[in-house]
Amino acid sequence: MKALAARRHHRAAPVVLLLLALLVTGGVYAVLAPSPAQAETASTADIETGKKLFQANCATCHGPNAEGTAEAPSLVGVGAAAVDFQVSTGRMPMQMNGPQAMAKPPQMDEEQTAALAAYVASLGAGPAIPTDEQVDPALGDPAHGMALFRTNCSMCHNAVGAGGALSEGKWAPPLTDVSPRNIYQAMLTGPQSMPVFNDANITPEDKRDIIAFLDEQRDGSAGGISLGSLGPVSEGLWAWVVGLGLLIAGAVWIGAKSS
Amino acid sequence: MSTTTTDTKRPAAAAPKTAAGKAADYLDQRTSVGVAVKEFARKIFPDHWSFMLGEFALYSFVVLLISGVFLALFFQPSMALVYYEGENPASMHGELMSIAFASTLDLSFEVRGGLLMRQIHHWAALVFMASIVTHMMRVFFTGAFRKPRELNWLVGMLLMILGLLAGFSGYSLPDDVLSGNGLRITDGVVKSIPIIGSYMSYFIFGGEFPGEHIIARLFTVHILLVPALILALIGLHLFLMVLHKHTQFPGGGRTDKNVVGYPLFPVYAAKMGGNFFLTFGVLALMGATMSINNVWNYGPYDPSPVGAGAQPDWYMLFLEGSLRLMPGQTEYVIAGYTLSLNVLIPAVIIPGLLFTFLFVYPFVEAKVTGDTREHHVLDRPRNVPVRTGLGVAFLTAFIILAVAGSNDLVATHFQMSLNAITWALRILFFVGPVIAFWITKRICLGLQRKDRELVLHGHESGRIVRFANGEYIEVHTPLDDQERWLRVNYDAYKPLEIAPATDARGVKRKGYKADKRWQRLSKFFFEDRVEPVTPSELAAAHSHGEHDSLGSVHEQHDALPAGASSTEQER
């Protein structure tokens, strides 16, 4: 230590200290800072593949450089999350025109989806694909998730996410089979008629709570067959079909059993 | 012949020997209950499955009482707020909610058998209303509401309305978001009534909605007031049924002066017992396997959220549909006061009209037939085409409203536009019942003509016979007596004939205009009719002109075009 103490008045000491401070600050920042929009460093090769896929499958509507046309919006700045949501659920490339794009078996495999996402993300900063930890239902609080779902989501998606109708043939799809990653992405990017719930509105932890609540619904209903969780209409229908059906069949049988 | 005196007095009944016999005798000597037992045991019930529909309502009500008592032991009708301590379901843990909601969760998840009982109770309520409605359909379409049973029809109508009230009040008790939405609609409907509306709402809720009293009030209505009234009216309903004797379907030997069937004891006691267990079994099966009204899905009531697919139970769906169909622009502000026709018409006036139709129909029909006789033999629906048509039109309107109440589910499940469905149903609500009436009436008249044809000419046998002169005829098999009775034994009423407008001295008669109106209505009912075959028509149809002389062949064929045309001339 003596040697170090002796040199503290050295001419170069301030410069060395400044460099050390910058290094530490930079290092701490690199460790603690929120991951940038493009979390996984996309290779130029991915972006190149993505661009080719885009031009073959998407450019007709979204324009050759994703700048948008009269038919479809610009994709500059929508981020990788939007692309991953739309393509991995099969909504894009769109199968047919209609009130809204329908989910179908995905047309692109995972690699192609990743390449497309990388390409679109390279056009402008946007929301990134969430990490597995961000969407893990086991880490969320379903009770808090339900309170959030009730006030933000249930008016379109039904109380437990069984889906619901919107105007003019549009609809809020059922969330029963949607993957946690896609649920997160939908909240983040607001696809089609859905509003955007950004991180200031519903924090990433809140989003995970919502996912935990929806995941809890998949365990089934405590009371038996859930009847689609559609509420009193399906209950009434089954009361007539099963209840009255069995009773009348029984009555015909008892009535026919003549003494 | 020697004269003998016979003692017509029966030997005194031997003293009972068995324990049961002794007990019965003890009771009888003190209460004369034997008279009532004898009366009931010998009551005759005709055989038909549709006569059991009312029993289903009765037995579901018994199930409702039993399961309801169980639920009342654990449910706490309080709107005070608590944090839910229970672990199940996870989505409710630590939530702020009313004690009513918390005790509903508690009785569903912590009380042994509680969820089963809740589900049985709710399914029984749905089936109770459904069997009431099917029972009403049977009574309406077969004309079982005619004299002397008009009053019992009214009692039944009151029972149905009380059933609606029981269902509605019970549905709201758990204080969840869904039923709270229903209460909010009720509040809106009450407030739409001109002048007294807002006072009524404050009166019902004890202040501004939702207040702190409504659950406790509904609890009293649900477990005390309505069940007591229903029980009393069921007693009256059954008493009148016993008093009037049971109706029976038409058939040989069945008249307005007898009842053909089996006595209550032992045959119908066994059948009714079996029916009770059937109802209980079906309801228990449904309660055990099919979830219903999972209130934890909706969460504790809070006036702000509304979930997609928020609907009432099926028997209230017509009201929901009526509200959904009504265009919203019909709200007027007159001198600072709001007149909400957009709520008043669909939620008060339309249900009012529908119920009024059911209440007055028996009396209107009695008036337009001018018939004051008692009727114990039921009508076949085809033989009263206008009544059947009106009934089907009523059901069509009811079903269209119920579909409108579920228009969002129709939209998602059939991938249609919600707006298009709503517009289609708005039009159908007016057009559909008219079309349904017209089609039903035509079908009825067609079936009656088919009956006439059958009675006059018999069944087609498929046998073709050629006469010596080369003429071909098809041999028809005549109907047996039972078949014929069924088809000819009905009333074909004619439109009312009224006294002329002026009397013999040319003075205007009082009440002529009213008579004229009734006559117009009577014409609507009975202008188009198919008369039953008369004996002379039948005889004419069975005579075959020159073929009568053909002897043996005559035995085998009963119909010829010549015979048929002579019938037409006789008419």
Image: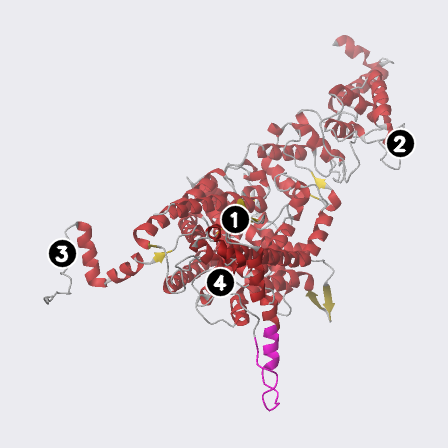
Earlier sequence position, callout 4 versus callout 1: 1
Tell me, for residue B15, which label it has, or none: 3
Q: Is residue B502 above or below residue B165?
A: below
Please say which color scheme the image uses: secondary structure
- Packing grade of label 1 (10 A; few <14, some 14-19, many >=20) is many
Of circles 2 and 3, which is in front? 3
Give the Cα distance between marks 2 and 3.
105 Å
Query: In the rendered structure, the residue with mark 1 lies on which chain?
Result: B
Amino acid type, callout 2: Glu
What residue sits right under mark 2 in the picture?
A67
Quadrant showing the C terminus of chain B? bottom right
Distance from the alpha carbon under mark 4 to that under mark 1: 28 Å
Residue type indicated by callout 3: Ala
Q: Residue A177 sits in which quadrant?
A: top right
Q: Residues within 10 Å of mark 2 (few under 14, many from 20)?
A: some
The answer for which chain carries disc 2 is A
- Quick check: B512 above or below B53? below
Q: Is residue B247 visible?
A: yes
Give the letter of the chain under mark 3.
Answer: B
State yes or no: residue B501 in magenta: yes
Please determine whether, in this image, residue B70 is positioned above or below residue B512: above
Q: CA distance from mark 4 to mark 2?
A: 79 Å
Residue of label 1: B475
Residue B164 appears in view? no
Q: Which residue is mark 4?
A: B490
Q: Is label 3 in a helix, a strand or a loop?
A: loop
Do discs 1 and 2 belong to a common subunit?
no
Asked if A64 appears above or below A144 in the picture, the reply is above
The magenta-colored residue range is: B497-519
Q: Residue at x 62, y 48 (%)?
A: B310
